[in-house]
Image (cartoon, rainbow, N blue to C red):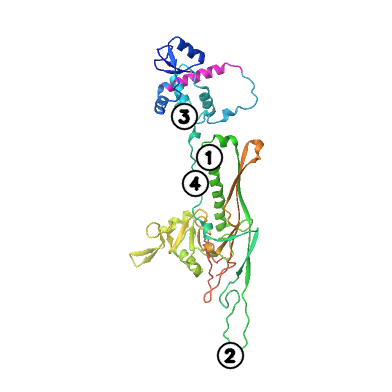
């Protein structure tokens, strides 16, 4: 019971609020030395002042040392099972106010042992050889970190590459999309249509287009975990919405990686390995030159220039900052225009087209460290109106007191261009997908 001292007695001062056993407290009241107090709530400012005082530190330290001395003299016993409260890093406290109240009581009652719950908490967090405010020598009791209801984590994606693709709704596991298969305009268009100059009364010559099928077959990405009921109940952070953001973003991160780097084996086919992708030879090892950028730009299919964007690894940025076209002896023109100044794009522009510096492009000096692509020429197949799914179940591990959380995405990606295109009056091929090769590259992926 809580009593307020009316007289200075037994080490207590007048107006001290003391937490005593009911029998002892009642004796003080019957003798006229104290009165009943119901002051359960303590001013937070007063708590903190008391917490920081040397008096509290001394009192708590002495109490803990006395308790340790008593424990050392006792006979060990065999314990069956584990006391789960000893594993709770919050020591059974439900909120900060309850924790601070026990701190206050420990400091206001120097002749009494600290509350049992406070001692239990201290035992659970004390680690030998580590700095912690768990005893006098290390600064007093530390507020449990579980009361900090916030979780900091990196945002994985901000490029929106899937949104640049042509989305194909898939009601079934597989869908085939017909397309006109053409690789050259040198003698025909649309893969075989030839236009003849036919004279009067002359017989017409037949020709026909060539068609192909681009087949999308759904692959599945998943993320899965179990969380104990205790963690869900005791955590100051609401775990379900955290995972509801984390898992779908992780899946989308892998999806974006596949759209650029996917091999097509058990996953979508991406830009870099695609058969239609043109690989431009690099001028020098481990670097990006203005000539490399110009060579890539001119290999872009002309009708794709309005949609094409650059993807570059972050470690290539320094290369673009020094690229310029010299004009006379005292002037020049930058190849890369920085953002929020000369260019409005988020990461600036290269030759007038937006650039995205991302970790999903290859590292500097490796084929694919710089990509120039029209992603609208990439098919992205998904279930109709289906976003990344996030679900939980209490049934799967019900007898283990665990909740299962899962997230999944079914998708496929395929470029609908099967090969680069040879223009009518040139030998260099064109494509909506162009990458910079490594220093050893001397030819394009699919011809000149």
Residue 205: x %, y % from top left: 62, 83
Can you identify the residue that label 3 sits on?
97
Residue 412: x %, y % from top left: 60, 58
Tell me which label, 3 or 2, sits earlier in the chain. Answer: 3
Tell me the distance, in whole angstroms, between the alpha carbons under discs 1 and 2. Answer: 82 Å
Mark 4 neighbour class, 10 Å CA radius: few under 14, some 14 to 19, many 20 or more: few
Can you identify the residue that label 4 sits on?
154
Q: Residue at x 64, y 64 (%)?
A: 176
Instruction: Find numbered disc 2 in the image and state the secondary structure of the residue it sits on.
Output: loop
Residue that extends furthest to the bottom in the rendered view of this protein: 201
Q: Residue at x 49, y 13 (%)?
A: 24
Is residue 144 or residue 128 the one in the foreground? 144
Instruction: Find numbered disc 3 in the image and state the secondary structure of the residue it sits on.
Output: helix
The mark lying in front, picked from 1 and 2, is: 1
Is residue 353 or residue 427 the one in the foreground? 353
First to last magenta residue range: 56-75
Can you identify the residue that label 1 sits on?
238
Tell me the distance, in whole angstroms, between the alpha carbons under discs 3 and 2. Answer: 100 Å
The mark lying in front, picked from 3 and 4, is: 3
Tell me which label, 1 or 2, sits earlier in the chain. Answer: 2
Residue 345: x %, y % from top left: 43, 58
The label on residue 146 is none
Q: Can residue 424 be seen in this snapshot?
A: yes
Can you identify the residue that label 2 sits on?
200
Residue 194: x %, y % from top left: 59, 79
Tell me the distance, in whole angstroms, between the alpha carbons under discs 3 and 4. Answer: 32 Å
Tell me which label, 4 or 1, sits earlier in the chain. Answer: 4
In the picture, the quarter occupied by the C terminus is bottom right
């Amino acid at each position: 019971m809580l009593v307020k001292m009316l007289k200075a007695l037994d080490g207590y001062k007048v107006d001290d609020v003391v937490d005593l056993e009911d029998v002892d407290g009642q004796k003080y009241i019957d003798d006229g030395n104290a009165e009943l107090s119901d002051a359960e709530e303590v001013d937070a400012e007063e708590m903190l002042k008391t917490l920081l005082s040397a008096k509290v530190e001394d009192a708590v330290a002495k109490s803990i040392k006395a308790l340790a001395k008593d424990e050392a003299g006792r006979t060990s016993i065999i314990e069956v099972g584990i006391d789960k409260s000893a594993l709770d890093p919050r020591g059974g406290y439900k909120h900060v106010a309850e924790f601070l109240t026990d701190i206050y009581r420990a400091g206001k009652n120097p002749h009494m042992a600290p509350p049992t719950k406070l001692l239990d908490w201290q035992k659970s967090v004390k680690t030998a050889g580590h700095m912690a405010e768990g005893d006098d020598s290390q600064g007093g009791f530390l507020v449990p970190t579980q009361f900090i209801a916030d979780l900091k984590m990196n945002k994985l994606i901000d490029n929106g590459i899937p949104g640049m693709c042509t989305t194909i709704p898939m009601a079934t596991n597989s869908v085939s999309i017909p397309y006109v298969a053409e690789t050259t305009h040198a003698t025909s268009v649309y893969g075989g249509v030839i236009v003849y100059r036919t004279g009067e009364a002359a017989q017409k010559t037949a020709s026909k287009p060539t068609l192909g099928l681009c087949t999308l077959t759904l692959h599945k990405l998943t993320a899965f975990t179990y969380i104990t009921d205790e963690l869900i109940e005791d955590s100051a952070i609401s775990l379900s919405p955290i995972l509801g953001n984390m898992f779908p973003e992780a899946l989308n991160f892998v999806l974006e990686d596949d759209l650029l780097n996917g091999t097509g084996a058990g996953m979508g086919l991406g830009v870099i390995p695609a058969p239609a992708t043109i690989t431009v030879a690099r001028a020098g090892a481990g670097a990006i030159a203005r000539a490399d950028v110009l060579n890539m730009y001119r290999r872009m299919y002309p009708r794709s220039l309005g949609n094409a964007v650059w993807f570059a690894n972050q470690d290539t940025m320094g290369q673009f900052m020094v690229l310029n076209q010299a004009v006379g002896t005292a002037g020049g023109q930058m190849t890369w225009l920085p953002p929020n100044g000369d260019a409005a794009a988020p990461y600036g522009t290269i030759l007038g087209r937006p650039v995205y510096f991302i970790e999903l492009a290859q590292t500097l000096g490796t084929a694919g460290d710089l990509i120039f692509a029209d992603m609208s020429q990439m098919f992205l197949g998904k279930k109709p109106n289906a976003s990344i799914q996030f679900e939980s179940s209490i049934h799967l591990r019900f007898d283990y007191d665990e909740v299962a959380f899962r997230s999944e995405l079914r998708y496929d990606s395929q470029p609908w261009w099967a090969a680069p295109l040879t223009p009518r009056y040139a030998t260099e091929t064109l494509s909506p997908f162009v990458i910079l090769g490594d220093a050893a590259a001397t030819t394009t992926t699919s011809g000149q």
